Image (cartoon, rainbow, N blue to C red):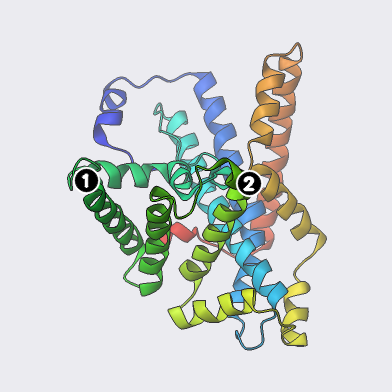
Amino acid sequence: PIVRYEDISYQLRHREFSSDRVSRGILRFIFGLGKKVLVANQMGLVADKVFSSSTDSLGTAPAWIGALCYTLQIFFDFSGYSDMAIGLGCIFGFDFKENFNYPFVSSSIQEFWRRWHISLSTWFKEYVYIPLGGNRKGKLRTDLNKLFVFFLTGLWHGANFTFIVWGLIHGVCQFLENHDIIPVKKKWFKPFSHIYVLLVTVTAFVVFRADSMSHAAGVLTDMFNIKAGSASVNNEVFALITPLFIVSFLFAVLLSAPVFRKIEAKMADSDYSEGCMIAEYACSLLIYVLCILSLSSGSYNPFIYFRF
């Protein structure tokens, strides 16, 4: 996570070391490693195949599978990276702030950005949005400030036009939400709000992943224009849908919602808290072993955000 000096200045001078911190840090690091190796890398195999295929040959089903896989890949790749950094920090006496908070359960794009890459959005808010006037200078200025921030957010990822469009998609959606054009605050819209957020984020990540805007347009056309596509390309994509991939995908869906956090909280307050701790250590050891086996049998797969 992006860390301000003032947030860790005291910790730099007065770090605390304990066996409990080391234990918690190791568990967090292993959890992040598992996200990257066992989930993100599996999703990446399918996503890379889809996005490297010709859009003329791509069918609707493979296009959607690829888009969903990339959305999960970048989330688990980056949140796993953040978990590993937070875990290492904990081991060495630092308490870093959380960088993700289940963004896919959001009911609006504004909420999504309060949960996604929290340290980056906080940095832009404090060093760009507020100095520009924030929301203190009227609606028009507020809208322009937000659009400019999301333009810079896209540009921060790279000079490619796809990144800028990705940022502006989120900025425009926030503009539409603020003016009730997309009625996220209306009660009748609540049942559709999560679908809306997922649709926007998946669509935007297609643009983010594509090599160019023409490539993005081709994939999006395949997604929303029903067609069978080339049998050979479809077969190549579906061949990657192995039992291991299905297990990884199911875990990805479960980990995208606060299911395990709620279970952990309930068990921690129960009479079986000691047994839960043993189970947590056993699961962490299993994840670590599976990660080592996966890394030893595969090729190097760097973190996506190392590019930025």
**Visible residue check, residue 115:** yes
Type of amino acid under label 1: Gly
Q: CA distance from mark 1 to mark 2?
A: 46 Å
> Which residue is located at x 69 percent, y 76 percent?
60
User: 20 or 135: which is nearer to us?
Assistant: 135
Q: Nearer the viewer, mark 1 or mark 2?
A: 1
Residue 64, horizontal then vertical, whole percent: 66, 69
* Crowd tier of the residue under label 1, counting other residues whose Cα lies within 10 Å: few below 14, some 14–19, many 20 or above: few
Who's the residue at 82% across and 59% down the image? 243
The percent coordinates of residue 289 (x first, y second) are: 70, 44
- In the rendered view, tell whether residue 121 sits above or below residue 260: below
Hey, which quadrant is residue 196 in on the image? bottom right
**Is 290 positioned to the left or the right of 98 in the image?**
right
Please name the residue shown 62% across and 88% down the image. Answer: 56
Q: Quadrant of the N terminus?
A: top left
The number of callouts visible is 2
Residue density around tag 2, few if under 14, some if 14–19, many if 20 or more, within 10 Å? many
**In the rendered image, the vertical position of residue 25 relative to residue 286, given as above or below:** above
From the image, tell me which residue sits under label 1: 138
Q: Secondary structure at mark 1?
A: loop
In the displayed structure image, the side of residue 107 where residue 270 appears, left or right: right
Q: Position of residue 10 (x, y in %)?
A: 27, 23
Q: Are marks 1 and 2 in contact (CB under 8 Å)?
A: no
Q: Secondary structure at mark 2?
A: helix
Image disc number at residue 251:
none
Residue 212 shows in the view? no
Q: Nearer the viewer, residue 216 or 12?
A: 216
Looking at marks 1 and 2 on the same chain, the residue that comes earlier in the sequence is marked by: 2
- Give the quarter of the figure containing the C terminus: bottom left
Residue identifier under label 2: 34
Q: Nearer the viewer, residue 66 or 288?
A: 66
Q: Tell me the kind of residue under disc 2.
A: Gly
